[in-house]
Image (cartoon, rainbow, N blue to C red):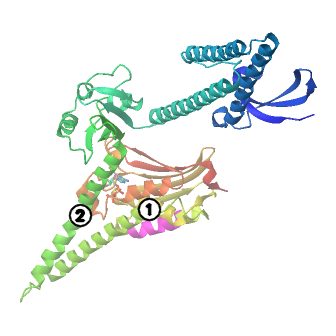
């Protein structure tokens, strides 16, 4: 008994139950006359290689084909010997063999016109051909699936972008746009398809930019759908279709205003420094003569000293502010005994008040302290108390109150000074913002104090509250969250 064990691939359709391609193992269990007992073992190819990557065993099909041909010839010869008409029988056998091939060819031609190729009853070489075509079909399907997955992924990515993406045809008509283009450029897909971009986003700068065809630098425009937004627009020709343009619009509002604030700040600081420098150099010129006016000498040196002090204060405040802005979140997190800290600040304030003799009232209602940076808290509280003294008439009262409740800890500095008009209050913490610049300078202010307070408080998750009334004094309060309170 010969045992044959040869796997070969059969198409999906041969396994309606499993609906998967499989390997069929044929075992020749012996011969019972002409018929063979065949055991079929099906192994699904889920974990094995897919059909398209399997090797089709063509030499085996050729052998099967040869067996078919020889079988036909043998039967024809036998029939010829039995009937005594060998040649006609042989001719008939060959004609039948040829006819069967023509039939298979016709069937294949017909089936090729259909979506799926299914020829379950093919044999010999035809089986090999069908399997080969099915393998190619599976490979084509797989590639198609991969391609559509990639397209889907790409579309998903572009649709999730916060930037607006628009594709323009050579005449400037909109070919495609992503959802972000609706919010930034007012272009909603698919309604905008085929419409002129410059008609939907009528900005002269954008029109000139597209007409100029020099896209080496982006153009900055105001968003046509939201005037509060500033957009930076980049345009690039598509790589494989150079006459189509890819337009990307990015919201740079925050960056734009930050840059503007930075520019203003540099200009303001330069201006602040130039004034004392001009005074000092003017006085130095007067003193640098052969016969300096000795009568004005003390006054001149006093003025020079005053201006140098002003510059020193400004530079020192600038350094404090930049340190607060640059450093990561509060580096130290120590226990700050607020009662002690306020006592020191009040003593310093008394010295500052000097002959002005402000009445400083320190009201400590809780022994609780704060978790934070003692130096930063000292700077913040001291700035508020100093401001109160500088903006309050001589001998007037300044009250400092420290209390803790369920909402957290609160420090308030209340003065009885001239107060601040409501329109100035939201801008007081801006760098170099002053209500009355000359009064601020005369009293030694730099215009940076409240900006420093705001930054120092932010680093302690605290908020600054300003309540003021013209002629009715002001209260500056710092509110700390309960997590910052240390009993
Ligand atoms: P400055 O060094 O000029 O005081 P700040 O940033 O500390 O700068 O304050 C900004 C402006 O806020 C001041 O110029 C002043 O006009 C106003 N201001 C601050 N504190 C008070 C206060 N207690 N009373 C009235 N005005 C105040």
Residue 311 is inside the magenta segment: no
Q: Residues within 10 Å of mark 2 (few under 14, many from 20)?
A: few
**Magenta segment boundaries in residue numbering:** 342-352
Residue 347 is inside the magenta segment: yes
Residue located at (17% from left, 40% from top): 212
Residue located at (30% from left, 65% from top): 444
**Helix, strand, or loop for circle 2?**
helix
Residue 15 appears in the figure: no
Residue 267 drawn at (x, y percent) = 23, 58
Left or right, 57 with respect to 343, comes to right
**Helix, strand, or loop for circle 1?**
helix
Residue located at (6% from left, 88% from top): 291
Q: Residues within 10 Å of mark 1 (few under 14, many from 20)?
A: few
Residue 405 drawn at (x, y percent) = 62, 46
Residue 360 drawn at (x, y percent) = 45, 60
Residue located at (32% from left, 58% from top): 447
Between 320 and 145, the one lying in front of the other is: 145
Tell me which image quadrant ligand 1 sits in.
Answer: bottom left
Residue 406 appears in the figure: yes
Which residue in the rendered view is the most extreme toward the front?
84
Between 424 and 179, the one lying in front of the other is: 179
Report the label total. 2
The residue labelled by disc 1 is 326
Between 103 and 394, the one lying in front of the other is: 103
Quadrant containing the N terminus in the rendered view? top right
Q: CA distance from mark 2 to mark 1?
A: 21 Å
The residue labelled by disc 2 is 270
Earlier along the polypeptide chain: callout 2 or callout 1? Answer: 2
Residue 170 drawn at (x, y percent) = 25, 31
Quadrant containing the C terminus in the rendered view? bottom right
- Residue 63 sits above or below residue 302 on the image: above
């Amino acid at each position: 008994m010969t045992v044959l064990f040869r796997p070969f691939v059969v198409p999906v359709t041969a396994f309606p139950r499993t609906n998967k391609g499989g390997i069929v193992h044929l075992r020749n269990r012996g011969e019972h006359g002409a018929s063979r007992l065949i055991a079929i073992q099906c192994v699904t190819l889920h974990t094995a290689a897919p059909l398209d990557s399997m090797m089709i065993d063509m030499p085996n099909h050729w052998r099967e084909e040869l067996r078919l041909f020889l079988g036909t010839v043998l039967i024809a010869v036998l029939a010829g010997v039995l009937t005594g008409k060998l040649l006609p029988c042989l001719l008939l056998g060959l004609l039948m063999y040829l006819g069967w091939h023509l039939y298979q060819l016709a069937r294949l031609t017909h089936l090729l016109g259909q979506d799926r190729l299914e020829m379950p009853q093919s044999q010999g070489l035809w089986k090999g051909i069908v399997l080969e075509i099915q393998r190619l079909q599976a490979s084509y399907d797989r590639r198609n699936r991969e391609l559509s997955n990639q397209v889907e992924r790409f579309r998903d990515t572009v649709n999730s972008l916060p930037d607006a993406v628009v594709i323009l045809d050579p005449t400037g008509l909109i070919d495609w746009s992503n959802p972000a283009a609706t919010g930034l450029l007012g272009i909603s897909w698919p309604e905008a398809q085929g419409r002129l971009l410059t008609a939907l986003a009528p900005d002269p700068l954008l029109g000139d930019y597209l007409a100029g065809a020099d896209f080496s630098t982006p153009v900055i425009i105001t968003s046509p759908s939201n005037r509060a937004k500033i957009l930076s627009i980049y345009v690039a020709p598509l790589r494989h279709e150079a006459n189509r343009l890819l337009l990307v619009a990015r919201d740079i509002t925050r960056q734009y205003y930050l840059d503007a604030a930075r520019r203003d700040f540099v200009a303001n600081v330069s201006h602040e420094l130039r004034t004392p420098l001009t005074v000092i150099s003017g006085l130095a010129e007067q003193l640098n003569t052969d016969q300096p006016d000795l009568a004005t000498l003390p006054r001149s040196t006093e003025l020079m000293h005053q201006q140098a002090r002003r510059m020193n204060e400004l530079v020192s405040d600038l350094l404090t502010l930049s340190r607060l802005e640059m450093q990561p979140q509060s580096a130290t997190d120590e226990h700050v005994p607020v009662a002690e800290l306020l006592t020191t600040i009040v003593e310093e304030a008394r010295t500052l008040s000097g002959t002005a003799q402000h009445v400083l009232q320190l009201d400590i209602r809780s022994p609780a302290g704060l978790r934070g940076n003692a130096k930063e808290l000292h700077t913040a509280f001291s700035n508020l108390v100093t401001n109160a003294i500088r903006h309050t008439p001589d001998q007037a009262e300044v009250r400092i109150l420290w209390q803790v409740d369920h909402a957290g800890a609160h420090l308030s500095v209340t003065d009885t000074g001239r107060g601040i008009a409501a329109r100035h209050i939201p801008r007081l913490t801006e760098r170099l913002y002053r209500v009355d610049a000359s009064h601020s300078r005369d009293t030694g202010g730099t215009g940076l104090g409240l900006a420093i307070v705001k930054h120092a408080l932010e680093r302690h998750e605290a908020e600054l509250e300003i309540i003021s009334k013209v002629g009715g004094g002001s209260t500056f309060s710092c509110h700390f969250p309960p997590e910052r309170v240390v009993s």
